[in-house]
Image (cartoon, rainbow, N blue to C red):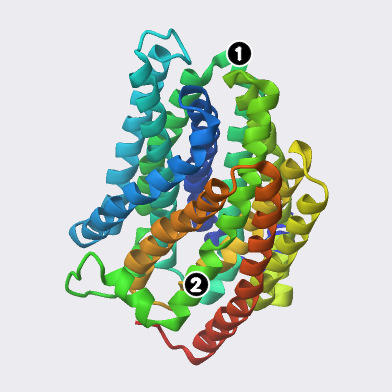
């Protein structure tokens, strides 16, 4: 019965494969569940401690900060074996979020014993730290998976892993939506920190039971350490990687504008940090419910039935419809619906497909080039959305010009997605690897 259900949801996946992917799904459950919690707290606490008008500038500050972090991360890739690197980085962020949990109890979110400047500093630092966690840790996880994956196994296993992530994000968002007032923001941050600290334990469990098949496959490439900007060089010299950069990041510009409208409207409507956090929790629950249902019932089916190229093109085409919808019917609930749909299908459809693009690539591309794409590329795209918002501070003007720019971006994105998907098919069929 269980085997039949697995075949219906994810195709012809063996029991042994399901055990391996199930453990990786458990890792992603804690990773993304914690991320959704701190992500929603980050926005609500920043607006409370600093002010919603500074959100565009916070995104720009995080971009500059992450440039330094990604350089350091690329050096760590040379220094540490990938499993140890996951241990190091996740323990660091788990400890960091525990510290934030304590500091939030002292800020105006809690007992308000900190001076005004300290409250604002906490808002800025928490924002940047959460942004870096969402970029570095998730990128590192996918690099770890892609380094030990073959294309056939990837088509079966990636949807399983994504399903675990959606369960975690749904639970995290549900806690934010229902327990923000009862438990308080500091305690919820503590729960997120504990979830992050579960990641190294799950990775250790995985390596104990499935190390030989996975780690051996990922360690076939033995090369001398390369420079910290090696990944950037690869992106600039490989058209395929430039295409992956576009497919992986440009949607962030469009969805950031959706989120900015939604967050600003929520802050103006609800006022208190608990109510705003609860509203954002509702948004998180809805987004991840869409993602989970599609991850279970649609992701594997669409990839197997229509192919990766179709999926890569379908997402921007769908996003163009959302832009037209919010342009015609603006409002907090309209933007909520657009963000839920855009984010939901991004997590369940676009993200698994773009991660599979890295399978026929070298270790330097999987870890170093990917880190530049996922960290700097993604944050640059969000910073572009923030720049647009800063250029048009009046909401009516931002709605008009932001929508026009978004549609122009999508018009460029679609043919690039076609190129990336077709190139990936050629690489897999020929057995070639991008070095």
- Residue found at the very far right of the displayed protein: 329
Mark 2 surroundings within 10 Å by alpha-carbon count, few (fewer than 14), some (14 through 19), many (20 or more): many
* Res 8 quadrant in image: bottom right
Compare residues 97 and 58 and report the one nearer the observer. 58
Q: Residue at 57% x, 47% y: name it.
A: 389
Mark 1 surroundings within 10 Å by alpha-carbon count, few (fewer than 14), some (14 through 19), many (20 or more): few
Position of residue 58 in the picture relative to residue 118 (left or right): right
**Residue 55 in picture, x, y percent from top left:** 50, 38
**Residue 271 in picture, x, y percent from top left:** 63, 20
Q: Residue at 67% x, 42% y: name it.
A: 395
Tell me if label 1 and label 2 are in contact, CB under 8 Å: no
* Res 349 quadrant in image: bottom right
**Residue 12 in picture, x, y percent from top left:** 66, 69
Label 2: which residue?
244
* Res 115 quadrant in image: top left
Q: Dot 2 lies on which element?
A: helix
* Mark number, residue 182: 1
Q: Residue at 35% x, 46% y: name it.
A: 204
Sequence-wise first label, 1 or 2: 1
């Amino acid at each position: 019965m269980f085997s039949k259900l697995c075949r219906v949801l994810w195709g012809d996946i063996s029991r042994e494969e399901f055990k391996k992917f199930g453990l990786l799904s458990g890792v992603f459950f804690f990773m993304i569940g914690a991320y959704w919690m701190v992500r929603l707290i980050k926005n609500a606490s920043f607006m409370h401690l600093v002010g919603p008008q500074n959100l565009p500038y916070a995104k720009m500050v995080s971009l500059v900060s992450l440039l330094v972090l990604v350089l350091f991360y690329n050096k760590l890739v040379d220094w540490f074996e990938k499993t140890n690197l996951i241990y190091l980085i996740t323990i660091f962020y788990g400890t960091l979020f525990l510290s934030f949990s304590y500091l939030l109890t002292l800020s105006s979110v809690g007992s308000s014993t900190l001076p005004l400047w300290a409250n604002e500093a906490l808002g800025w630092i928490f924002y940047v730290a959460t942004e870096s966690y969402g970029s570095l840790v998730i990128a590192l996880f996918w690099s770890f998976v892609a380094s030990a994956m073959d294309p056939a196994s990837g088509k079966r296993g990636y949807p399983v892993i994504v399903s675990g992530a959606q369960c975690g994000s749904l639970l995290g968002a549900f806690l934010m939506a229902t327990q923000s007032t009862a438990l308080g923001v500091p305690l919820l941050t503590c729960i997120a920190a504990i979830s992050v600290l579960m990641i190294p334990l799950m990775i250790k469990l995985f390596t104990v039971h499935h190390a030989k098949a996975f780690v051996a496959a990922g360690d076939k490439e033995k090369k001398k350490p390369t420079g910290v900007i090696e990944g950037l060089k690869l992106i600039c010299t490989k058209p395929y990687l430039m295409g992956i950069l576009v497919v992986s990041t440009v949607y962030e510009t469009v969805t950031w504008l959706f989120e900015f409208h939604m967050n600003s409207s929520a802050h103006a409507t609800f006022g208190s940090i608990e109510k705003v956090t609860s509203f954002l929790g509702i948004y998180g629950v809805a987004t991840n419910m869409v993602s989970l249902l599609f991850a279970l019932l649609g992701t594997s089916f669409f990839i197997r039935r229509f192919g990766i190229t179709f999926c890569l093109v379908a997402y921007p085409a769908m996003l163009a419809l959302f832009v037209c919808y919010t342009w015609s019917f603006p409002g907090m609930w309209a933007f909520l619906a657009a963000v839920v749909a855009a984010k939901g299908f991004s997590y369940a459809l676009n993200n698994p497909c773009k991660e599979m693009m890295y399978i026929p690539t070298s270790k330097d591309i999987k870890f170093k080039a990917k880190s530049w794409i996922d960290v700097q590329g993604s944050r640059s795209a969000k910073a572009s959305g923030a720049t647009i918002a800063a250029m048009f501070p009046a909401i009516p003007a931002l709605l008009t010009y932001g929508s026009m720019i978004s549609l122009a971006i999508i018009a460029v994105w679609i043919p690039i997605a076609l190129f990336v998907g077709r190139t990936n098919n050629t690489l897999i069929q020929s057995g070639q690897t991008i070095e």
